[in-house]
Structure formats: C-alpha cells, structure tokens
Image: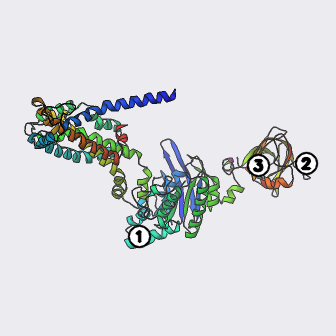
Amino acid sequence: MAHVSLNRLHKSHGDNIVVRDVSLDIPSGRFLTLLGPSGCGKSSTLRIVAGLSQPDSGRVLIDGRDVTRLDVQKRNIGMVFQSLALFPHMTVADNVAFGLKMRGVAAKDQTARVRRALDLVHLGGMAGRFPRQLSGGQQQRVALARALVVEPSILILDEPFGALDRKLREAMQTELYRITRELGITSLFVTHDQEEALMLSDSVAVMNQGRVEQVGSPVDLFERPRSRFVAEFMGLSNFVRAQVVNADERGTTLNAFGRHFEAPAAAVVIGESVEVALRPERIRLSAQAPQTEGAVQGHVLQAIYHGSSSDYALRLPDGHVLNVRQGNEQAEMHDAQPFTIGTAVWAQWQRSAVHILQP
Amino acid sequence: MNALLHRIGQAVTALLYVFLLAPLVFVVLVSFNGGPVPSFPPTDLSLHWYLAALRSENFMNGLVTSAWLALAATLVAAPVGVCAAFGIARGRWRGRAALEAFFLSPLIVPGIVIGIAVLVALAAIDFGNAPVRLLIGHTLIVLPYTVRTVLASLARMDPALEEAGAVFGASRAQVLFHITLPQLKGSILAGAILSFILSFDDVSVSLFLSSAQTSTLPIAIMSYMQYNFDPSIAAISAMLIVATLAGALMVERFFGLKRILGS
C-alpha cells in the first residue's frame, strides 16, 4: 500500500513520442485506470511504472521515494500481464510462490502465504495443477494471486481481461473489485474498455496520443467530459456545433437544430460557436408533441432493438441525425413503442443531457 | 470429383511412403537371412548374421568410436548452439541475420566440402590427431540442429515470461535458470538427440577425417563392403535403422519433428 506519483514522464521511440508529459497521482489504496485506444501510450506508461522500461525524462515516486532508476526486481511490484505470463513449467503453487522464493521468504511462510493467496482467489484446490490444465478464468486468478502474494507496493494490471468472453470478464471484474477494495491495495489498471474502467476505478485517466486528456472520478468523466475525444470514449455521440445565445452563472442558452435550448453553465462567450455533445440515453422520444418547450421533431431513420432498450437514429428537419437510446420499459407506458422506421417522433431533453466541450 | 481427387492424393501419398520405406524394410528383411549371401526373399530365417556383426571387431570398434564421437560432438555443440541462438535471437546489433546464416550453413554446404575443408585446415597447422579432427568436423555438422531448435523455441516464447520473472524479483541469472532455460529444455534435448543421430550416421565428413586406427561405424561398414558382401552388413544396418528410428521418436516426443524440419 503506497502512494504512487508519476511526474512529467516522457518517452519516445525514435521520432515517435509515445508518452508526453504524463503526471498522475495514485493515493495509497486507490485504483487508477489508464483508459484509451491502442497506441495511446497507456501500456508504455504502465511499463515505466513497473520498471520494464525507462522514461526519457520524468520521475516515478513510490511513497515519495524516486524509483525511476531502480531495477525492476527491487520495486516490489505485483503485476498481471496481458498474456498472464504464467510459468508453464511450474505448478500453480510454484507460480504463486515464485515472488516469495526470489525474496528469500522462509519455505514455511511461503506455503502459508501461497495458500492464503489462492484462497483469496477461490483456487484453494488447484495448487498442484499446471497452468495448462486450468480454464482461462482460473489462469487469471492464478496470475492475480501471484501478483498479490508478494504484498506489493502497487498492483499493476495490463488489460488482463481482454481475452475472456463477456460473462467471464464480468465475473473477473467483480472479483478484482472485491479483492482490491478488501486489501486496500494501490492499483494501476490499463484497459481500452470504457465500461470496465468506470466500474473498477476510483479515478480514470483518459489517454490520447501519449497525453492524459482528462483525469477524474468515473462520474466526473462520464458526466463532464471535457473534450470530444473523452466524450466519444465515454460513449457519447451527437456532436453538433452550436451558437452561444446567452450565458450567465445560471446556465447557457445555445442555438442549434434551428432552435434554442438550455445547457449547464460554462465558460463561454456570447456569440461564440461551441461544440456540443448530447447524451443519447438522456433524450426522450414521444409520439405526440410534448407540453414542454424545446422539443424537436424528426423521423426515425434507423431503429435497433436491444431488448431492454432500443437505439434510434432520427433525422431532424435541418438534416442533422440524432442518436437516441430509449429504455423500452418506459416506452411501453406511452404505449406506442418501440418506434418503427419512418415514424415521426418528438425528441426532448433536459439541460443535463447537454455538454459543452472544450475546443 | 472431389472424392476422386482425394483418393488419388491418398494413393500418391501411399506410393511415396512405399518409395521411401521400401529400401529400409528390404534391408531389415534381408538381415534375417541365414544364407551366406544377401538374398530376397530370405531363404531361411536366422539371427546368425546379427551374431556375426556383433562379433566383428571392425564393426564393434567403429560402433564404440561412433558412439563416443557422437556423444562428444553433441556435448560440445549443445552449449555452443544454445549460446549462438541466444545471441542471434536476443542481440540488437547489425549482422545478426548473416551470423544466423553462418551458423546454419553446415546444413547447406555438402559434407564432403566440410570434410575436405577441416582436413586441409588442420593439415596446414600440422594437426593430425584423428579423434580430435573427427570431433571438430562432427561438431560443425551438428551445430545447426541445436541452433535451429533453440532459435525456434526462443522465437515462440512469450517475452512477458522473463519480464514476469524480473518483476517478481528474479535477477538476470535467476530468470535464465528458473524461467528461460526450463522453457528451452525440450528443444535443447531435441537438438541434442538429432545431433547425436546425425553425427552417428555421418559418412561424408568422417570419410576425410578418420584414420586407419580411428574409424566410425559407417566408415567401417563401407570399407567392409568393398571386399565382402554378406548379410552381416544388412544386420548391422538394421540395428542402425532401429536405433535411429528410436532417436527420431524421442525427438518427436519431446519437441515435434515438424518444428525442426519445417522452417
């Protein structure tokens, strides 16, 4: 359990800058996720923290101590690799014991700690097996136990669940959440899966082209994405340019789709053109014109039924296409649902559905 | 139509096997002949010529020489080959590809050329010790097998394995002995078995490097054949075939022959 800080890390391979000025802070016992598409620099950053690669400049601090030039062996790190990297020629118990053995822990203590670690991941009965005799999920658990047993300063996980099918992935995510919170271990997680990042993390750093675009709590990032990149990564769509009609501390009035609508207060100037994101799941559709003001009418261009919800694409009179996700249980109460292609519908939204993005 | 093509394919494969295996089967059958000359089909079954072969001082001396030579060449080539493979696979310097080609070149250069080259080179420095001469020649021809099997294993090994070792506290030496070498065990063993077989069966290189006193089994068989023609040759050959087959099966068990022979 340690406080980990990354301080202005830079790393390039030749002309290719892979990590640009990355500074992050993981308070003791917290779970930080690096989120981004492949090639965004998240894995390179993780490898620098692990000590598997050296930054060109910048520092890694663990509990205030500069470990940037410290050998990987001496960093006291627990790591789960993307390929898991279980040692194929060792049994489960030997895999888990490896870090203890290298640290010179007495054989008796090794056995006890290995047993505890395996119990923690519910693999008590598998100690004598070889990795190839285990299922994918069990192998994940072994890798996790191997990383946890050494009581590391920081637990590092490099897209560990990418290869699992959806159901197993969800089970492992829940498991990882439980274990990390139970042990109160400082964790650094890397993924390109937005949902995984949101559900597991205390804070998320969205990375793009080697830079940290935005850091914040999952709610922060989801509710207040600052850039279009982050917004897109958080599953937002409906990006539109809007004119600022009015702006004060109570809110902002924008003009787009040929009408005025309200948005939360933002640092904008009247008359300026801003990019706006609209949350698809916070737009309400109805067959009749609603009583309230500010609804727009459109035609259903596309309707995709997902069971509990449906995704629609609406064509607005001014040519814009609006993506809408509508819960079907609510739709049923208005007894006209799900909408079919070609239907004329009304779309309306609260101002919390609107995000003004930074240029 | 497809079924017909399939049948034809099967027939061609079967014919190929017959073509490859018939001489070996033939030799084995002839070796059980009781008569004084090799004849097919065997006139009367007997192990007489096996006994004769095993009693032949020529053959037995050759067998002992060949066995020691193959063992020594294997034991020299294996560590050298492992080191060479590491250098080629892990090095980050220019000329690695050239070095790889160099280490594998004995596969391509005819044995006769290697034999003559070693003979001429050693004669130039006035070195005439036949056992050492043979050892040098045989080490050269078997070296590519270890290099190749280990290179293949290193290329397939997950680089994260060694990283995991380091992350969990192993020094470079500990990573090598606890993680890397255990991963290579099968391929080193396979390379060694192949080396042994190749050295044991070699004729062309040994032809130039053996002496009247130090002769390998294949050379002994060859010289015997120049003056005699009896089924003891078939008997000793049959024993060689069985031993080689056993070696090949062992390699298959540890490593899979395909991975060495297919590139």
| In-front residue for pair A154/B242 | B242
Chain containing mark 3: A
Identity of the residue drawn at 32% across and 44% down: B85
Residue B229 is left or right of residue B26, and the answer is left
Question: In whole angstroms, how far apart are the C-alphas of marks 2 and 1?
Answer: 70 Å
Q: Residue A332: where, in percent of width, then height?
A: 83, 53
Give the secondary structure at mark 2: loop
Give the residues drawn in magenta, as a range.
Answer: A225-230
| Same chain assignment for discs 2 and 3 | yes
Q: Residue B189: where, in percent of width, then height?
A: 30, 49
Q: Residue A240: where, in percent of width, then height?
A: 76, 43
Q: Residue A110: which numbered mark, if any?
A: 1
Residue B121 visible within the image: no
Question: In whole angstroms, how far apart are the C-alphas of marks 3 and 1?
Answer: 53 Å
Q: Which residue is mark 3?
A: A310
Q: Which residue is mark 2?
A: A289
| In-front residue for pair B165/A14 | B165
Question: In whole angstroms, how far apart are the C-alphas of marks 2 and 3?
Answer: 20 Å
Chain containing mark 2: A
> Is B13 situated above or below B92?
above
